[in-house]
Amino acid sequence: MADQGQMGLTGIVLAGGQSRRMGRNKALMALEGQTLIGRVLDKVSSLCDELIISANDADLYAGLPARVVPDIVPRRGALSGIHAGLSAMRNEMALVVACDMPFLNLRLLRYMIVIAPGYDVIVPRVGGSYEPLHAMYSVNCIAPIAQLMDQGPRRVIDFYKHVQVREVAQDKIALFEAELSFVNVNTPQEWVDAQRLIAQRR
């Protein structure tokens, strides 16, 4: 399963969104004969020795090689999913990705794992913005996330000032040719675009 030696690492795939812009559950849409979430789990499983799906409807993901964990604090968006996954994991560190990222770059993810020791968050920064749903988080993030959620809906990155963060700069991302790793599929047009990208890569 995992190929990261002695480092225990949990993979958390966020699948708790409502898919309102897509109009149906995007996690279960098929791309190249495989659901989006299945495709993501395949990638993540090569790096992690534990797999968690953060979602509130376990029946939807029955049969997938991952434990489904519901929100502890509901209605806080991605923060709810990250918090629930981190709270349930058996390792000290997790790789957290969204279920709709069909082009995850393993070289970039491995680099993030290598530089993780000593930090609570490893997060790419692209075009001046963080990619918090393509990041690594330690158990030390659980408490500050919980405190942030007590204030109501907030951005994921709002708790970063309370933990040790290491950014992955855009030039490093370019070195791995990993720009597509952050592409996600939220709308019917983005679904068409993803299919076109796959056809071009064949």
Image: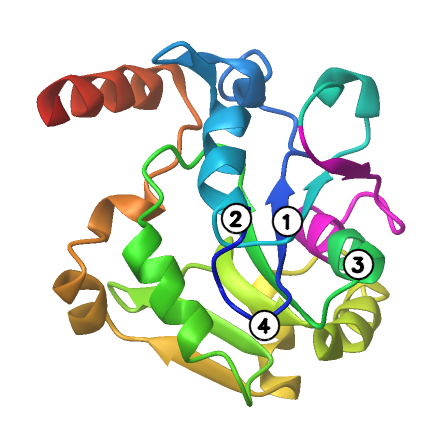
Q: CA distance from mark 3 to mark 4?
A: 38 Å
Q: Is the residue under label 1 in contact with that under label 2 (CB below 8 Å)? A: yes
| Residue 102 on the magenta span | no
Please determine whether, in this image, residue 118 is positioned above or below residue 67: below
Relative image position of residue 155 (x, y in whole percent): 60, 60
Which mark sits nearer the N-terminus, 3 or 2? 2
The amino acid marked with disc number 2 is Val
Residue depth check, mark 1 versus mark 4: number of the one nearer the observer? 4
Q: Secondary structure at mark 2?
A: strand
Q: Residue at x 55, y 90 (%)?
A: 118
Residue tagged by mark 3?
152
Q: CA distance from mark 1 to mark 4?
A: 19 Å
Circle 3 crowding by C-alpha within 10 Å: few under 14, some 14–19, many from 20: few
Mark linked to residue 12: 1
Q: Which residues are magenta?
A: 65-82
Q: Is the residue under label 2 in contact with that under label 3 (CB below 8 Å)? A: no
Relative image position of residue 135 (x, y in whole percent): 49, 62
Residue tagged by mark 4?
6
Q: Nearer the viewer, residue 119 or 56?
A: 119
Circle 4 crowding by C-alpha within 10 Å: few under 14, some 14–19, many from 20: few
The amino acid marked with disc number 3 is Gly
Please determine whether, in this image, residue 138 is positioned above or below residue 15: below
Residue tagged by mark 2?
97
The amino acid marked with disc number 4 is Gln
Q: CA distance from mark 2 to mark 4?
A: 22 Å
Q: CA distance from mark 3 to mark 1?
A: 23 Å
Image side of residue 85 versus residue 43, left or right:
right
Circle 2 crowding by C-alpha within 10 Å: few under 14, some 14–19, many from 20: many
